[in-house]
Amino acid sequence: KNEDTPLAMASTTKIMTAILVLEEGNLEDMVKVSSNAANTAKVRMNLSVNEEIRLEDLLYAMMLKSYNDAAVAIAEHMSGSVEAFCQRMTEKAQEIGAMDTVFGSPNGLDSTLPFQKHHSTARDMALIASYALKNPEFVKLVNTQHVEIPMKGGKGKHYSVDNANRFLKMYDGACGVKTGYTNKAGQCFVGAAKRGDRTFVTAVLGSGWGTEGKEQKWKDTKALMDYGFENFTKEIVLSQGTKMGDAKIKNSPTTMVSGYAKEDCILLVSQEQMQKIQYQIQQNEEMDAPITKGQVLGKVTLWLDGEQVGETEILSAESAPKFTLMQRMKKLGKDWVEFEISKEIPFLQ
């Protein structure tokens, strides 16, 4: 419910920070910690000013234990400043389709940020997480239980980092993603679980406050996951080879070709949704020869509750060659004869 209500999202923000590191960063880069990063509010690694640490190590520390100073160090290294990095975060959200999301922080700390500069929705956070989970490196990251970050060259510090996401051990098939809490956002969790060929992603924002809220976010997430696994299955809603209509062909002895769906359209749907799926065919009613077997004639899109949920091309089931010169001459002769006869008919009455 309230999936499109703008809300603060606390450390679930770090999902987007991780996306940008994996897609646009060099994990072997050495990051020099600034005073700004070292003095970030808790929870933090307690990085030291001028300490150098690998970008990949910062990424794991940020996602497993939610260290805020790691996120700031990442942002400054990647974009030169926190502000520039947050602008890139917002741009990436829009590229993904999360249009109601604005980032003003790489870690989700929001006590000094106006709400309009840092917020999202449950729908957008689930969308962002779904995008991230398509990357195997992100899946590996959020499912890692423990990492040791050794000193580099005998310098710096040694860090031992455990994954703070309890959901990984409390729900069958759990495979992510990120917890979060601030006084403004309340308890937040973006979760994922996979069983067989089905994966569900959930997002709860403002799921409670204080000690009681810590458990409430798990209860809410479990309820959403259970509902998904109990009510939604993968179904072939349009089968490969299904006839999608005919197209008239001009300038060919073959006057009509059939179109068929190129591939299966498979959706994760409830039985109620299955009955509501609509199909829209976009195909020229008339086309010029030659047409080859398997040529694209158009496409069919699938819609559910006003949202496009699938698409596949429509291919020609047969060929339609152009008239040969002899066929064209015969056709011209036939047309001429028919024309002459039609002219005579009125005089025969």
Image (spheres, rainbow, N blue to C red):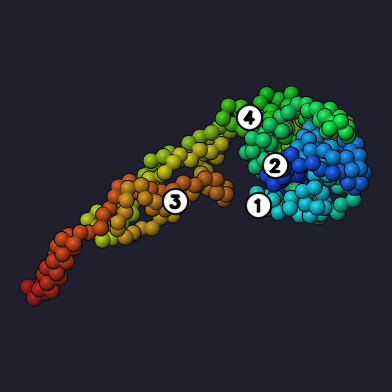
> Residue at 38% of width from left, 58% of height from top?
284
Between circles 4 and 2, the one closer to the viewer is 2
Where does the N terminus fall, quadrant-wise? top right
Disc 4 to disc 1, C-alpha distance: 25 Å
Q: Position of residue 135 (x, y in %)?
A: 64, 38
Mark 2 = which residue?
A: 22
Please, what is the three-letter code of the amino acid marked with disc 1?
Answer: Glu
Upstream in the sequence, badge 4 or badge 2? Answer: 2
Q: Are marks 3 and 2 in contact (CB under 8 Å)?
A: no
Upstream in the sequence, badge 3 or badge 2? Answer: 2
Disc 3 to disc 2, C-alpha distance: 34 Å
Disc 1 to disc 2, C-alpha distance: 16 Å
Q: Are marks 4 and 2 in contact (CB under 8 Å)?
A: no
Q: Position of residue 12 (x, y in %)?
A: 77, 40
Please, what is the three-letter code of the amino acid marked with disc 4?
Answer: Lys
Upstream in the sequence, badge 1 or badge 3? Answer: 1
Please, what is the three-letter code of the amino acid marked with disc 3?
Answer: Lys
Say left or right for 329 vs 247: left
Q: Position of residue 115 (x, y in %)?
A: 83, 52
* Disc sitting over residue 299 in the figure: 3
Pick the front one: 243 or 230? 243
Neighbour class for label 4 at 10 Å: few (<14), some, many (≥20)? some
Residue 188 sits in which quadrant?
Answer: top right
Say left or right for 250 vs 167: left
Mark 1 = which residue?
A: 95
Image vertical order of residue 3 relative to residue 221, above or below: below
Image vertical order of residue 189 relative to residue 347, above or below: above
Q: Secondary structure at mark 4?
A: strand
Between circles 3 and 2, the one closer to the viewer is 2
Disc 1 to disc 3, C-alpha distance: 24 Å
Mark 4 = which residue?
A: 194
